[in-house]
Image (cartoon, helix red, strand yellow):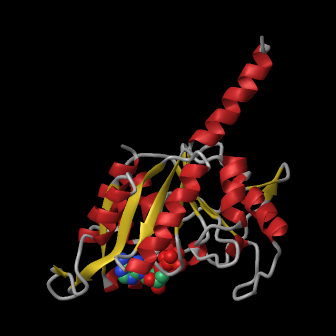
Amino acid sequence: APGVAEVRVAMMADKAVQKIVAVGSGKGGVGKSTVAANLAVALSRGGRKVGLVDADIYGPSQARLMGTEGQRPVAHDNRLVPVASQWGVPVLSMAHLSQPGQAIAWRGPMASGALTQLLEGHWDEAEILVVDLPPGTGDIQLTMLQKFKPAGAVIVSTPQDLALIDATRAVELFEKGGVPVIGVVENMAGYACPHCGEVSDPFGAGGAEAAARSMGTDFLGRIPLDIAIRRESDAGTPTAAGEGPQARAFADLAGKVMG
Ligand code: ADP
């Protein structure tokens, strides 16, 4: 029988593991980072202690999205201390460790090492760690699955068919790795009129929902293409921190992710 100490270590390991919610996508440019940032802020507004890790090592964008550009994390006991943001969500991103615009050209093992440093930062305070994964199904995703086994994954897709096919691959990657897929979010779903706010569907609606159903995963909702989201993201003021209709859409998403 295992000793008390071993049981406790196992429990601690379990706790660290249980709190990661990975946000993935089959391809880039679908708004995965935007959804990850706003999900983290919405969860925090809902009263959770949340941290945000930018695992998009080669194309980090969370420092800009969260308004923490130019801040540098310090190390304590050889572990990185997350950078505080104005939104109640501390962040760690490669963007905090490299120079702005600096190209990151690492091979897989080094990128996986960087991911480990970000995830093994001082996250003890966080109940939930939202992790923004790089797009696709490569080395980083495998390290994430094998070493940090997230409690669940949220897949972001646009309504376009190609993105959906890629999203199907992302869902399969997590399921094969034993990480439950919490569900699929359809982003850039319909166009929100900047004047009246009405959402229209120039390309049709419902593709991601149907795809989620056919993959046997939940559909977590739609976020429309809204100029306000793009503007607020660029300004480092996440939409979910505001009061508009899209802030409510992100709050709904956070509610569904927590079940
Ligand atoms: P990814 O992480 O999938 O590469 P990003 O989150 O970086 O995608 O988003 C790509 C671009 O699209 C960014 O300029 C972002 O501001 C914009 N964007 C994302 N989602 C929306 C949305 N729902 N409405 C308007 N612009 C969006």
User: Ligand 1 is in which quadrant of the figure?
Assistant: bottom left
Task: Examine the rendered structure and indicate whether residue 125 appears above or below residue 85.
Answer: above
Instruction: Tell me residue 125's x, y (percent).
Output: 61, 43
Can residue 251 be seen in this snapshot? no
Tell me which corner region of the image, top left, top right, bottom left or bottom right, holds residue 84: bottom right
The mark total stands at: 0
Can residue 198 be seen in this snapshot? yes
Image quadrant holding the N terminus, namely top right
Instruction: Tell me residue 31's x, y (percent).
Output: 45, 75
Name the foreground residue: 10 vs 216: 216
Relative horizontal placement of residue 216, taking residue 206 as reference (left or right): right
Task: Examine the rendered structure and indicate whether residue 103 appears above or below residue 40.
Answer: below
Task: Examine the rendered structure and indicate whether residue 68 appears above or below residue 148.
Answer: below
Relative horizontal placement of residue 35, taking residue 142 as reference (left or right): left
Tell me which corner region of the image, top left, top right, bottom left or bottom right, holds residue 253: bottom left
Q: Residue at x 70, y 85 (%)?
A: 100
Instruction: Tell me residue 195's x, y (percent).
Output: 17, 88
